[in-house]
Image: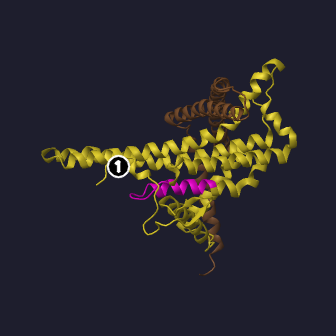
Amino acid sequence: MAAPDPDRLNDLGKRLDQFQTKQAAGQRRRAPSQSQIGFRFATELFAGVVGGGGIGWGLDWLCGHFGFHTRPVLMIVFFVLGTAAGIRNVMRAAKEINAEIAAGGRENGKESGS
Amino acid sequence: MNLNPMEQFAVKPILGMDKPLLTIAGHPIYFTNQALLMVIVAIASALFLTLAVKPNRLVPTRGQSMAEMSYEFVANMIHSATGEDGLKFFPFIFTLFIFVLCSNFFGMVPGSFTVTSQIAVTFALACLVILLVIVTGFMKHGIGFLKLFVPHAPWYLLILLVPIELISFFTRPISLSVRLFANMLAGHTMLAVFGGFVVALGTAGSLAPLAIAPMLLIVAIMLLELLVAFLQAYVFAILTCIYLNEALHLHDHH
């Protein structure tokens, strides 16, 4: 392959830059779709509840193993804590999604400004 | 023809490999269709990425451009989510992203097998991520990493809040893996169900022309599934970045 002509390459580079800035200006980073957000929240809550209950169940089992008959007290306690953790997860997810959308808006503003 | 929509998720030894490869503590280990697809995904993505950038041309070919774009995409994602020092984890996150992406896309090939529709696979990946987060946190901050679990609150509330934060942290692998697994499972089941409609209508004599309706629907769902395949890989990778960011910078969230 012959060495490319530097002038042509520079020209191409310039045109690519122009094209990219034009595209970046026209393109808004879209927020995640509604169903994706909904699904995210659902799994966060699910993970909290199931994870909490599971941890409690496991601790009950462990305590039973060592002769303490706590079943089902720990499972109930951890189920409630897990539900709280699930709600905490959802709140955090909402905050992350908001931050993502805000960051997208800032970036677009910067790029279209240059 | 088998019309059970869940049939496609069955893990079974591939043809000609009915004997276990090896036995670990009495458990026979088979080379299954799932293992085969994982090997194919790993080899195909590694081969494509290395061969595509091999020519290393100034004006890239189509393949090289794809490889470079995915590199830039992941690098930008890490940079925006974790900042400069997150880029150390680029190899891990890039590998994770490409593996999940290729698994999802290979699963879209009719007749193949979707690796990411198995909770065993996604949960293993998610546990890997959480382990990395924990190790990173302790290496960076030492015992101070535990401050992540102590929000700003009066001490009597901390008795309640610290366990909640702990559960919230340790259930992350569940939400991470369930999201990917459930998305893939739901999409592929839906495709199979509508495929069943096509067969049922197509063999129903005078109703046969009606089979075109679910057929068209399948095309639409297929397009949606291609989008979901990419989106879920992206979500998996970006959440990894977000969790790593917390371990790196110890955001006090309150």
Numbered range of the magenta stretch: B96-114
- In the rendered image of this protein, does residue B234 appear above or below residue A46? below
Q: What residue is pinned by disc 1?
A: B219
Q: Main secondary structure of the magenta part?
A: helix
- In the rendered image of this protein, does residue B134 appear above or below residue B163? below
Along the line of sight, which residue is nearer the eye, B70 or A18?
B70
For the C terminus of chain B, which image quadrant? top right
Q: Residue furthest left?
A: B206
Along the line of sight, which residue is nearer the eye, B183 or B21?
B21
What chain is tagged by disc 1? Answer: B
- Residue B41 lies, in percent from the top left, at 54, 62
Residue drawn at x 68%, y 41% is: A110
Q: Is residue B113 left or right of residue B218?
A: right
Choose top left, top right, bottom left or bottom right for residue B26. Answer: bottom right
Picture colour for chain A: brown
- In the rendered image of this protein, does residue B52 appear above or below residue B166? below
- Residue A15 lies, in percent from the top left, at 59, 59
Q: Is residue B111 magenta?
A: yes
- Residue B198 lies, in percent from the top left, at 26, 47
Q: Is residue A30 magenta?
A: no
Secondary structure beneath label 1: helix
For the N terminus of chain B, which image quadrant? bottom left
Q: Which chain is yellow?
A: B
Q: Is residue B83 left or right of residue B103?
A: right
Choose top left, top right, bottom left or bottom right for residue B46. Answer: bottom right
Residue drawn at x 43%, y 44% is: B187
